[in-house]
Image (tube, grey):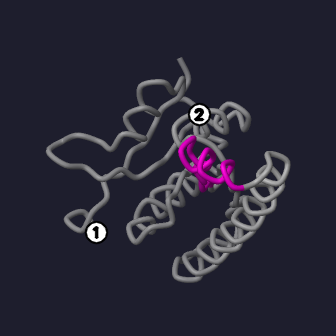
Amino acid sequence: MPLPKIKTILYTTSLNEYSRPVFRHAVQMARQNGAHIHMLHVVEPVGEMGHALISSYLPEDMVKRVHDEGIQHVLEKMRSRVADFIDEELASLPDTESLVIEPQVAEGPFADTILDQAEKLDADVIIMGAESGFGHHGHTASQVIRHAPIPVYVVPTGKQFI
């Protein structure tokens, strides 16, 4: 049986203070395998409570328009943050000229959106960080690990791992 080929990496990020060490694991794996990285940031949609509250003050068509315009603005802002993060981090690492990193921002529930994007991109592996307390991963990481049909590489985050 041949070794698995890793050509497409889905790296998910919350863009928090602990994202950089996780990103570096994705970069290292991409270098070793000649793989492309899809860097995904997920924006969670407004919950039912928020929608109900807004709907009590505005007509439904206006709520939809305000949501669509607002989410477009948020997605554009997040795309810019993702691109800036990539530029800043790659500038501090050697031998990154040949890396291909595609920034992506998607709206939806975290775990479901990560799994959907992995399938859509035909990813070979998912790389994500997870706050680890007492040997347990965070909720999103646990859900992705449980339901992913591909390997999930989880980098523990938090100050004790930096």
In-front residue for pair 18/99: 18
Residue at coordinates 62% horizontally, 72% vertically from top-left? 86
Q: Nearer the viewer, mark 2 or mark 1?
A: 2
Q: Secondary structure at mark 1?
A: loop
157 horizontally vs 58: left or right: left
Percent x, y for residue 68?
Answer: 80, 55
In-front residue for pair 138/47: 47
Q: Is residue 11 magenta?
A: no
Percent x, y for residue 87?
Answer: 64, 78
Percent x, y for residue 117?
Answer: 67, 39
Mark 2 Cα-neighbour bin, 10 Å: few <14, some 14–19, many ≥20: many
Looking at the image, tell me whether mark 2 or mark 1 is earlier in sequence order.
2
Q: Secondary structure at mark 2?
A: helix
Distance (Cα) linking label 2 and label 1: 27 Å
Q: From this view, report whether residue 73 is shown above or below residue 35.
A: below
Percent x, y for residue 114?
Answer: 58, 40
When asked about the image quadrant of residue 2, the answer is top right
When asked about the image quadrant of residue 19, the answer is bottom left
Residue at coordinates 42% horizontally, 41% vertically from top-left? 140
* Residue identified by numbered label 1: 162
Residue at coordinates 19% horizontally, 49% vertically from top-left? 133
In-front residue for pair 21/136: 136
* Residue identified by numbered label 2: 115
Give the residue furthest to the left: 134
Q: From this view, report whether residue 56 is shown above or below residue 111.
A: below
Q: From this view, report whether residue 67 is shown above or below residue 5.
A: below
Q: Specify the amino acid type for callout 1.
A: Ile
Location of the C terminus (image quadrant) = bottom left
Q: From this view, report whether residue 123 is shown above or below residue 99.
A: above
**Circle on res. 23:** none
Q: Specify the amino acid type for callout 2.
A: Leu
Start-end of magenta stretch = 40-57
